[in-house]
Amino acid sequence: MIIAFAKRYWITTLGGAVVSGLIALGAFSVGTQTVEDLVGTTLRQKGARFATFLTEDPSRLNAFLTGLARDPDAEQRVRAIAGLSDIDTFVIFDDQGNETYRSRSERYKWLLRDRPGGMTAGDKLAVDVLKAKADQQVVDFSSGSEPSVITPLRLEGRTVGYASVGVDTSAQHAAFGHVMTGAIRDLLVLVFIVAGVPSVFYLRRKRRMEEADERIHFLANHDVLTTLFNRARMQAETDRLLATARATREQMAYVYLDIDGFSEINDEVGQSRGDELLRIVAQRLSSVLDRNDLLGRMGADDFVFLRRRVQGPIGIADLARRVARAVAEPVELGDRTIQLQISMGVARMPADGRSHAELQSHAEMALLHHKANKLGDFSLYDPSMNEDVARRRQIEAQVRLACETNSFELFYQPIVGGPDLELRGFEALLRMPNGSGGHISPAVFVPIAEARGYIQSIGTWVIQEACRQIAAWPEHLYVSVNLSTVQFRGDDLVDVVKGAMEAAGITGERLEVEIVESLVLDRSDAVLRQLEQLKELGVSIAMDDFGTGYSSLSYLWRFGFDKLKIDQSFMKAFAAGEPNVSQIIETIITMAHQMGMSVTTEGVETEEQVALLRRLGSDYIQGFYYGRPVAATEAAAEWISRHPARRLAAPQTAACPAGPELDADWQTGAARA
């Protein structure tokens, strides 16, 4: 932490260290001078007292100055006094500065150091000492640990000589030095407390402010969940690169991609795991792109990236393939394995736009086109897509309005019994008014509703409305409803069906649900479990459009379907004279009966087809021959009230011409041909 702090604020740290060093150096200098002053004061006091002692007895002083009639006992007494005063050595000079007596000499330390009579080394005082004031003492620290002080010797108001006293001050220096060191240490601690601690708090506060600014800047430019560029930053960076590319003529590709069915996946796995999926997608996209490419998140499950230096259509196709493969890698989330699929739209620069706004708009159009047709790994923008997108957005607005105002409608097509041609029930088919008296084909609006997440609520409404309507009709009739794959992704389908039947007051025998083969192939365990629960409610389960998809017979024995619905394409093939069609239909009917399932054949439009199906044993017949899908009021007036005997006769006019039979085929969103 300290190292990181020092690295971040190295200038501040260096400045603090320099200031602390200067304070320490100044304190050391002042302390050293103070120690020398204290030692000098002690020396002066010792020198003054020793000089006073010598001048108290003029004869004794004269003996040291002249060397004549010196009393050995007196000399010894002077030495004793000097020793008691911690004076290591003393030297006597006459008034001319000539040395007359020295107690010992470091220069001639090979001699006896304290011999009686002393010795002389022939030293002479400097001129500036002799010219000093009469009462001035001179301290000399040049001798290291044994400095000396020179004190004038005065008798009767005149200077008669000089006494130089040498004292070993190493102990004093050490004591004073220890005290000064402690004082300097305390001073530095005080400086740190007074200046350093507030500085630390200031820097910490400054760091928090910087982190807050960095966070604000990050949030203003990045997506919090994936850390990718957000919409605003992506636009700014794209426009910046595009401005450069105008001069370099660099070609780029702007790719807009969307995760198919992510809202349903998010509802199924939960918000936290959905967020984890988005982070994984962001990481996988980053691994495919180059370092100089731009990548951003534009919406809940929408990502965009700007690919630089693209190599024409081949390079774009290769990039799209690698992106699709990377995202499609299975993801393990707890006990679930999820394989994501994406749709991609591509706009080229400069061919399809020279600004971010143009490229994004055109790439989004291409994305919507790709979601609608799912041809290849991506769709490349084409100007003709403008009209398609405008139409799609108009329909999307109508779907949203229909959901908000409950303006969807259910049309009902009759289903008759094959053996007796009695009216047995109806298939409920979803319709959406177009606002001008007509209706929009489910093949058009259902894929849009699925892509925008409306299909769940629409499917719930269909179940509730169909149950309500069949409850108003004779009890021997049932209603068949198509279920979307989206409705099986949640965990509330069984509750929705159960609640709708209870609210309408009907039993399960009056409700049939239709699913397609791809549903049980893609989501076998979860779907089969919900289908079993529906069967426990008494609801009949029918496999719709049998014979057009995988026709996986394994699911026929893994789950006990109640009915197979033969796709209308077989009737069209029979009418066109295709060979072996009747044999195939007979095989399907025989297999179903052997497995305990009934059979409904769709797309019946001629009397010849009716005769064939009755001969082959089809349990139920459905098609334009007996009636087109109509509103509930028309169905009640045309078929129920007019046929109290429950037998639905063939129409008196010519057979209906072949034409499209529209239904709410949730799984593909395509109209039945």
Image (tube, grey):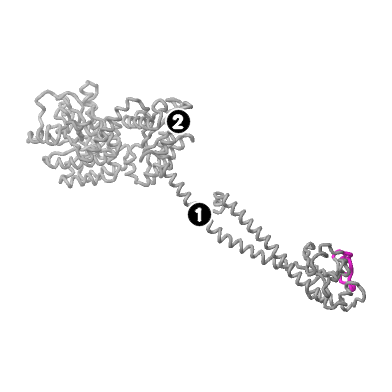
The correct choice, above or below, for 613 with respect to 156 in the image is above
Binning the other alpha carbons within 10 Å of mark 1 as few (below 14), some (14 to 19) or many (20 upward) gives few
Q: Which one is nearer the viewer's eye here, 527 or 178?
A: 178
**Residue 596 visible:** no
Binning the other alpha carbons within 10 Å of mark 2 as few (below 14), some (14 to 19) or many (20 upward) gives some
Q: Count of labels shown? A: 2
Q: Residue furthest front?
A: 157
Q: Which one is nearer the viewer's eye here, 393 or 465?
A: 393
Q: At x 67% / y 67%, what residue is drawn?
A: 179
Amino acid found under the numbered disc labelled 1: Arg
Q: Is residue 448 magenta?
A: no
Q: In which quarter of the image is the C terminus?
A: top left
Residue 337 lies, in percent from the top left, at: 38, 42
The residue tagged 2 is 243
Q: Which one is nearer the viewer's eye here, 333 or 202?
A: 202
Q: Residue furthest top?
A: 577
Residue 645 lies, in percent from the top left, at: 7, 35
Q: Is residue 388 left or right of residue 317?
A: left
Q: State if disc 2 and disc 1 touch (CB < 8 Å).
A: no
First in residue order: circle 1 vs circle 2: 1
Q: At x 37% / y 45%, what residue is drawn?
A: 273
Secondary structure under badge 2? helix
Q: Which one is nearer the viewer's eye here, 606 or 87?
A: 87
The residue tagged 1 is 204
Q: Is residue 273 left or right of residue 130?
A: left
Residue 441 lies, in percent from the top left, at: 22, 31
* Highlighted magenta segment, given as a residue range: 106-123
* Residue 671, label in figure: none
Q: Is residue 62 left or right of residue 403?
A: right
Secondary structure under badge 1? helix
Amino acid found under the numbered disc labelled 2: Ala
